[in-house]
Image (spheres, rainbow, N blue to C red):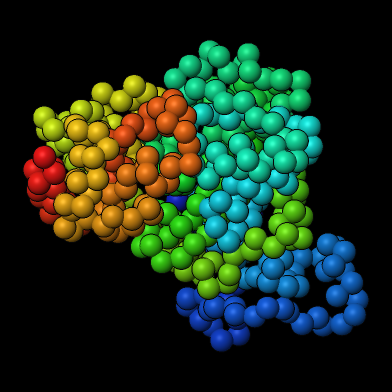
């Protein structure tokens, strides 16, 4: 990766997504081959020693690195405008090692209250076992954040837009807050993808992804990524190298190819999502609709500032509470009922009973997850067919 490429922060390039690839072999292939090997041979004993001593670059063992994984990460770094990165076996592996590799016993994390359910479990259940504490702050009350920073605070962790509430926080403001207090800003960019938002441009030191979602885009494989400064990724890579949350070469190969179509897919996701959200706002059976690029969204202006489009997720609350919500989901005919998102196929999810079921009622209410909340990951189908299925499910769930 050239110095010029590394410095192009915040400028998503479809050409980079397509043309950046691992060097060709002597077979002159046009598409990068799969490197399905657990290990790599050394030219001689001296090369083996130098590789293990990190004196020269190169592959040793696929748990450490692999040409397919390297290509995938180099593309993501170009698209996000970061210096370095590492691929992981899943999105949650990425979230965990982005924190656990840097924090130590006695440290404190300031996190947005509105985070994914499994991230909440890391903060609330896993980290306390090793005496890493956390404090939640509300995205809707930014004035309170600085007062929650403690002498042992080392990191700020947020996801924006949040899952599933679609809350937005000002990354630029957070970047300045982190700089003021010498903290690491870690942003989960899963919902936005590199195409819609580049947190490093606004001051984030680490950017995390669940590549399982929109980056893959077709619900085929599991994967994640941690991107950031060279200094921080060095710590993350050491932790991952010795704990083993590595991505398989096949998944890396597939995800790298998926990046080639990310822009065209996200354009259609966003177009469909905005039109669907606008349509649902006029339905009397819907209490409220939330989508970042709807003018009714509380952080609409902020979303327009730091996102290129509003994303592929729409949430709405149906009248009748949890019972009506379950009837609605059971009445869907075309739309998939699944816990995943970011697929070509539209998916509906009931967060309160699935992805965020481990939270208490009070914790769910605090982040806007009401009993009747439905999360829709808007796919690439003809929108009229999606609307028709939602309309009949709303009607048949009364």
Q: Nearer the viewer, residue 242 or 57?
A: 242
Q: Is residue 163 visible?
A: yes
- Quarter of the picture containing the N terminus is bottom right
Q: Residue at horizontal 23%, vertical 28%?
A: 288
Compared to residue 53, the image places residue 167 above or below, namely above
Q: Is residue 286 above or below residue 93?
A: above
Q: Position of residue 397 (x, y in %)?
A: 13, 44
Q: Quadrant of residue 70?
A: bottom right
- Residue 55 is left or right of residue 82, and the answer is right
The percent coordinates of residue 362 (x first, y second) are: 44, 27
Q: Which residue is drawn at the image coordinates 55% and 57% (left, top)?
A: 90
Image position, residue 155 (x, y; %): 67, 32
Residue nearer the viewer, 133 or 272: 133
Q: Nearer the viewer, residue 214 or 244?
A: 244
Tell me where residue 245 sits by quadrant: bottom right
Q: Quadrant of the C terminus?
A: top left
Q: Residue at x 78, y 39 (%)?
A: 104
- Left or right: residue 143 versus residue 38 is left
């Amino acid at each position: 990766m050239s110095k010029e490429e590394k410095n192009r922060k915040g400028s998503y390039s479809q050409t980079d997504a397509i043309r950046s690839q691992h060097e060709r072999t002597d077979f002159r292939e046009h598409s990068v081959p799969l490197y399905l090997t657990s290990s790599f041979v050394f030219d001689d004993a001296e090369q083996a020693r130098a590789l293990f001593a990190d004196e020269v670059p190169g592959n040793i063992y696929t748990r450490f690195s692999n040409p397919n994984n390297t290509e995938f990460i180099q593309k993501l770094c170009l698209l996000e405008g970061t210096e370095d990165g590492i691929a992981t076996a899943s999105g949650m592996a990425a979230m965990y090692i982005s924190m656990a590799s840097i924090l130590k016993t006695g440290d404190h994390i300031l996190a947005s209250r509105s985070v994914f359910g499994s991230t909440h479990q890391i903060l609330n259940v896993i980290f306390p076992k090793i005496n890493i504490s956390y404090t939640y702050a509300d995205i809707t009350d930014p004035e309170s954040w600085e007062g929650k920073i403690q002498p042992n605070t080392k990191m700020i962790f947020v996801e924006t837009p949040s899952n599933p509430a679609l809350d937005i926080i000002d990354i630029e403001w957070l970047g300045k807050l982190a700089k003021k207090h010498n903290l690491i800003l870690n942003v989960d960019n899963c919902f936005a993808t590199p195409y819609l938002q580049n947190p490093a441009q606004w001051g984030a030191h680490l950017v995390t992804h669940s590549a399982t979602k929109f980056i893959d885009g077709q619900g085929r494989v599991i994967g994640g990524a941690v991107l950031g400064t060279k200094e921080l990724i060095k710590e993350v890579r050491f932790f991952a190298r010795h704990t083993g949350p590595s991505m398989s070469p096949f998944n890396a190969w597939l995800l790298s190819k998926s990046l080639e179509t990310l822009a065209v897919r996200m354009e259609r996701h966003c177009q469909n999502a905005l039109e669907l959200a606008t349509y649902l706002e006029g339905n009397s059976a819907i209490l409220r609709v939330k989508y970042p690029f709807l003018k009714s969204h509380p952080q609409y202006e902020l979303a327009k500032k730091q996102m290129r489009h509003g994303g592929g997720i729409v949430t709405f609350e149906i009248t009748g509470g949890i019972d009506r919500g379950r009837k609605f989901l059971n009445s869907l005919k075309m739309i998939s009922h699944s816990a995943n998102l970011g697929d070509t196929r539209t998916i509906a999810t009931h967060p309160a009973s699935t992805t965020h079921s481990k939270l208490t009622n009070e914790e769910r209410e605090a982040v806007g997850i009401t009993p009747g909340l439905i999360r829709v990951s808007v796919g690439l189908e003809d929108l009229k067919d999606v609307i028709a299925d939602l309309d009949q499910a709303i009607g048949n769930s009364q």
